[in-house]
Image (cartoon, rainbow, N blue to C red):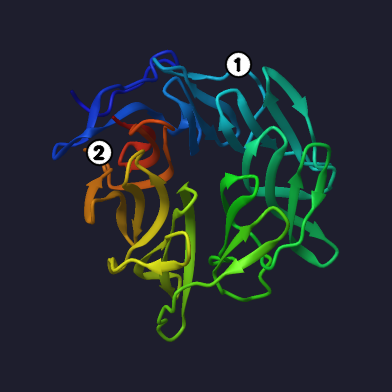
Amino acid sequence: MKLWTIIATAGALLVAGAPVAAQDREWHVSAAAEASIWGGLGAVGATGQDDAWVVRSGLPLMRWNGVAWRDETDPAVPYLVTAAGPGMSWRFAENPDQIEVHRLAAGKWSSLPIVVESAHVTAAATTGPDDCWAAGLRFGPHGMSDVLWHWSGTAWRTVAAPYPISDFAAVSAQQVWALSSPGEDKLGYDGERAASILRWNGREWTSTPLPPIELPEGGYLELNDIAMPYRNLGYAVGAITVGGLPREAVVLRWDGTSWQRLDHRTPSTAYTYVATDGGSGLWLGAARPRQPDALVRFVDGTWSEVPVTPQGTTRAEIRGLTNVPGSTRMWATVEASAPTGVRQLVLTYQ
């Protein structure tokens, strides 16, 4: 079966069952379309075997119903979605006057906006209908500043944190983890590039010590994603970066007491995503300069790599990666470039 099919109508969007690479038949293309039809695919999330979603640029969500991907009928266009389980999710949408927030709980949608002008949420996490964290940026008289909001059942309130937050991973309402990593734009960091891992204990945010990491001249640690599959086990991934390019990959593991760096230091590689595989292992997204992205598996102490560059494409960028809770199934979103144009892929592993 050819991976790419010329799409003549919007009703023929899916290209199902095509393998990503011959050497690994377990990752397959679940859906594919031209970027001009689907828009740009972003983050992917799931709460069960028959419920997954993909965020799209300027378009409603795509939803998986257990059989096929369909456009959501709700005309709203959320740019960020976080969920704590089936039937419990939070959505964030653009509005210059306030941050539009909609919560689904007990089968009912509620509008719970963050009433702040010229603000944008960049990361969010929830553990239930009465607990949601949102980190973002607000434009004010002195430029951009970082902001952290918390919904604890009745209202949004601002909360102080030691550093700006770039990503979350929630275990419970009393154990929420966050990354603070400025990246290349350094928004909200006053020019600094010091990555940190923060922890919420139910009362306050504190910074957790990181292991010593030797940095080359001009280099800095960048942490891109965090996953906490269990209370006493977690991972944070990224790279040592020099001049905007990755020098070597970094994988940190939380053992319930401290963060330690794994002895896995792939050169010229940045890990951009990490997710549990539903068992004792991990899937990671790997990015390298001037090369296509790849999916990396870590299980039982062994690392292996799966390319995500379909036949006929020259570049592939992973846009999202998630596990289906309670299973080993995975979803990933990929943007692939070919001489005929840009194509959007939803990949599945099962």
Q: Is mark 1 on a helix, strand or loop?
A: loop
Residue 186 in sight in this render: no
Q: Is residue 312 left or right of residue 69?
A: left
From the viewer's side, name the closer residue of 1 and 29: 29
Q: Distance between the residues labelled 2 and 1?
A: 30 Å
In this rendering, the answer to whether 39 lies above or below 231 is above
What residue is disc 1 on? 73
Instruction: Tell me where residue 210 appears, x and y as whole percent.
Output: 49, 72
Q: Type of residue at label 2?
A: Pro
Q: Residue at x 64, y 19 (%)?
A: 74
* Residue appearing at x 45%, y 70% in the figure: 244
Residue drawn at x 56%, y 74% as measured from the top left: 194
The reply, left or right, for residue 305 in relation to residue 322 is left
Q: Residues within 10 Å of mark 1 (few under 14, many from 20)?
A: few
Where is residue 265, by image quadrant?
A: bottom left
Residue 117: where, in percent of width, then height? 84, 48
Query: Which of the two residues, 49 or 287, is positioned nearer the viewer here?
Result: 49
Q: Which of marks 2 and 1 is in front?
A: 1
Residue 73 in percent (x, y) is at: 60, 16
Residue 115: quarter of image:
top right
